[in-house]
Image (spheres, grey):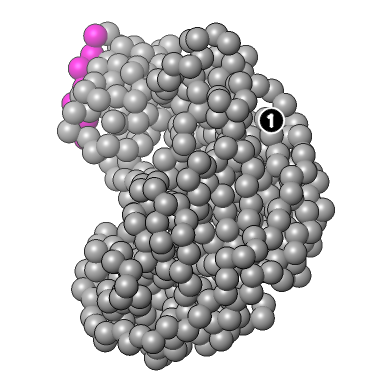
Amino acid sequence: MNISKLIFVILIVLSHKTVGQPIQWNVPNRQQCGLANGSFEVINGHLLKRDQAGASIWMKQVGSGTEHIAASSSASVYGVTGQRVYKLDGNGNLMWCLNFSVPPNPFNHEPTRLGGLAISGNRLFVQEYQCPPPPIMTFATIDDGVIIIDTNGVFQGVYNKSRVTGKMEYRGCRSSPDGGVWLFNESGNSGTGVEMLHVDSLGNSYPSQYYGIQHGHYTTLADFHIMPDSTLVTATEGYFDIMVMDPPEQSINITKQQPDGTPVWSYYYSDSVRSPYGYGNYPRSLTSDSSGNIYLVSVTYRDNGTGIFDIGPSVIGLDSNGSVFLHHFWKDPPGGSWINWDLNWSDGHHVINVAWPNGHGATITLDSSYNNPCMGPVVDYTLTRTAFPVGPMLGLGSLHPVTYTPQQDTVSIQPVNSIIYQDICLLFPVGIDSPELLLDIYPNPATDELLVSSTQSIHPESIRIVDLTGRSVTPEISYARPDRMKIDVRTFQAGYYLLQCTTIDGKTSMTRFIKR
């Protein structure tokens, strides 16, 4: 083996091209509860409500920050912040709050940790743990299970079990058609696997309905989705590192199961083109349509043949049997590399919602060919499909009721500036770079100054720069000659900007840049 392959490759990002081995895509905390007349979202700990058109209604900081949410209508939303579970009405006012800081098992010295939550009927299910923090890899005795609260805040009970295991991370829960929920965990020491446990409406669990997914050296859960026929679909990320496979491989794993957990099919999907550094496909968000087709948004790293990775989003479509019928890859998305994705099915269209860490967002509506002209050219390539097994995990025991009384509590609620969403075509119009006036900008991203050159003389008073909200920014510009200029961007806020220029004879063009 070439010893150089054992050396970590530092990724150098120039615009949106990357050299070297793919890395874990950095996705800030984001969740979405899509509803018929709007949505609730969590972005970096802030709770956001949007209307049906996608406009922000309000955004609030609840306690130390919201970690998980659940909602079945726009009239209310349930959330977890630290060791508290709360309910807000549709206007963002607190209705009730319960504190679970006292550990359900007093003999376990680890603090209570709360995970995902889901609404099923008139009950709220919340994951509950007493275990070491996730980075701790040594084996430990943990208690894990579920808290049940009715939607009026009346505590119904805690149901958990004790076991010895390694690292444990809660990943969320999803309501099931029988009035119960599925709980999802990641656990393991020498690598991670995904555990799925079904809990009925009374807190009962069954060892025969405890399933695990393990594919690759590491397996992490990306998303899970209930299909129209009540089957459960999960998307996981499988990784074989260089000690197992050279070059390393990052694959998409999708599993479909019956409501009782019995696997229907399970496949992993990988790119047939591999570079010396492997490749990466990072699943992000699942949805389905009324015909039972499954759709997934992933972030893709793909070698373009020069040792440089193109980075961009992919939309993958699978039929009900897991066969691929669609794979669109935008290797040059507008605005460079995007990091937040949510895919939804709305009014017969697929809609991708994107949010940047700087507090701005975009909505991308895909047409009947699963494209959007403002996203740039689409590349299609082959994904190979390979079956892998999903088996029941027996002998872990059932959940048992625990005597417990939570504390009635309150939580602070502070309004914050809302995320501003705009249609992608308003942010990055089709034909944004005019062939009549070609602009060249450097460096991009820029830190202190932006150097601009053009094929024609630019009218000095025509320079206009706007941010993603449409707000004009007044730049300080110096000219070396009529077709060369320098723009001082030191006072600009970090983010994406549009630069518009007009020539002496009236020709206009725009290009985009990033302020770092």
- What residue is at 50 percent from the left and 84 percent from the top? 123
- In the rendered image, the vertical position of residue 326 relative to residue 439, given as above or below: below
Dominant SS of magenta comes to: strand
Image quadrant where one finds the N terminus: top right
- What residue is at 36 percent from the left and 37 percent from the top? 496
- What residue is at 72 percent from the left and 30 percent from the top? 381
- Kindly state the secondary structure of the residue where label 1 is placed: strand
Residue span colored magenta: 474-480
Quadrant hosting residue 268: top right
Q: Which residue is mark 1?
A: 271
Instruction: Say which of 491 and 504 sits in front.
Output: 491
Q: Is residue 228 left or right of residue 126?
A: right
Quadrant hosting residue 14: top left
Q: Is residue 309 left or right of residue 466?
A: right
- What residue is at 60 percent from the left and 28 percent from the top? 244
Image quadrant where one finds the C terminus: top left
Instruction: Say which of 48 and 261 sits in front.
Output: 261
Looking at the picture, how far across and down is residue 266, in whole percent? 74, 50
- Asked if one can make out residue 152 in the rendered structure from this viewpoint, the answer is yes
Q: Verify whether residue 479 appears in magenta.
A: yes
Instruction: Say which of 285 and 193 sits in front.
Output: 193
- In the rendered image, the vertical position of residue 259 relative to residue 123, given as above or below: above
